[in-house]
Image: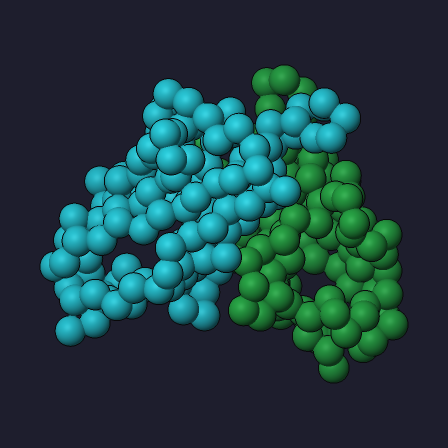
Chain colours: A green, B cyan
């Protein structure tokens, strides 16, 4: 299985300040078709996960442009340019390059 | 509108069997894979497995192979997750989600966009 490792596991951030979450995979996520199937999801308390970013950097419809994704191969980053109160929750990276799909452990974003 | 509606919360005893469901609507149920994800209390997301209702092709995570059975009944657009003998450690929230293979532009993209509301399973003596 591909192991996904996120850092940090907890991120206290001041409102209006940026936040960054790292995700590293145990092997390259480049698929044989040339695409990298790395997505980011947000889970607010008491809710199912919500898709934010797919294929490293593609922002899903309706996701605010303060969210951005980057990276290549085995190292990926989710950035929030200016954290808002509604961004509180847990963020997961997920690889869909190879079965079984796997998630990172999650990063809890909280407001200082 | 695409919807995945899961069955209600369950409270079971160790050793009992259980089958929970995920009903899809608003799309062609047989054309999209449906995945299952576990979330134990206060913990992260774990990918369990996935099924293609069109032909019942199923893939399991090794961590869950032999522990659960994923199935689907395309005649009623419903996917299932079942246990033959529950353990206390099966206590968790379970989510189903629809797997997309292409984005809105038709470009290959694998992700889970639509999620069920979750089914809470509690196993306690």
Q: Tell me which corner region of the image, top left, top right, bottom left or bottom right, holds residue B76.
A: top left
Most foreground residue, A39 or A10? A39
Q: Is residue B19 left or right of residue A93?
A: left
Q: Residue at 57% x, 38% y: name it.
A: B26
Question: Residue B55, relative to residue B4: is it above or below?
Answer: above
For the N terminus of chain B, the quadrant is: top right
Residue A111 visible to the viewer: yes
Q: Residue at 77% x, 26% y: name it.
A: B105
Q: Residue at 63% x, 53% y: name it.
A: A50
Q: Tell me which corner region of the image, top left, top right, bottom left or bottom right, holds residue B111.
A: top right
Question: Residue B101, relative to residue A58: is it above or below?
Answer: above
Q: Tell me which corner region of the image, top left, top right, bottom left or bottom right, holds residue B121.
A: bottom left
Q: Is residue A10 left or right of residue B15?
A: right
Q: Residue at 73% x, 30% y: name it.
A: B104
Residue A106 visible to the viewer: no
Most foreground residue, A64 or B114? B114
Q: Residue furthest left?
A: B15
Q: Residue furthest bottom?
A: A112
Image coordinates of residue B56 in percent, x first then y, are 35, 25
Image coordinates of residue A40 in percent, x first then y, are 65, 48
């Amino acid at each position: 299985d591909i192991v996904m490792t996120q850092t940090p596991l907890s991120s206290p951030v001041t409102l209006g300040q940026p936040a960054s979450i790292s995700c590293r995979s145990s092997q390259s996520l480049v698929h044989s078709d040339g695409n990298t199937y790395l997505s980011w999801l947000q889970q607010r308390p008491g809710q199912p996960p919500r898709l934010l970013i797919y294929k490293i950097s593609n922002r899903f419809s309706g996701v605010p442009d303060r969210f951005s994704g980057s990276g290549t191969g085995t190292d990926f980053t989710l950035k929030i340019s200016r954290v808002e109160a509604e961004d509180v929750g847990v963020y997961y990276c997920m690889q869909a390059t190879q079965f079984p799909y796997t998630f990172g452990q999650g990063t809890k974003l909280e407001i200082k | 509108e695409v919807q995945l509606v899961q069955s209600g919360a369950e409270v079971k005893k160790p050793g009992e069997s259980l089958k929970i469901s995920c009903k899809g609507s608003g799309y062609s149920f047989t054309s999209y894979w449906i995945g299952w994800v576990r979330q134990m209390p206060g913990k992260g997301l774990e990918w369990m497995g996935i099924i293609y209702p069109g032909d019942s092709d199923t893939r399991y995570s090794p961590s869950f192979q032999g522990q659960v059975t994923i199935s689907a009944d395309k005649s009623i657009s419903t996917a299932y997750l079942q246990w033959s003998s529950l353990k206390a450690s099966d206590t968790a929230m379970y989510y189903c989600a629809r797997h997309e293979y292409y984005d809105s532009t038709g470009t290959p993209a694998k992700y889970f966009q639509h999620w069920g509301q979750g089914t809470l399973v509690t196993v306690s003596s």
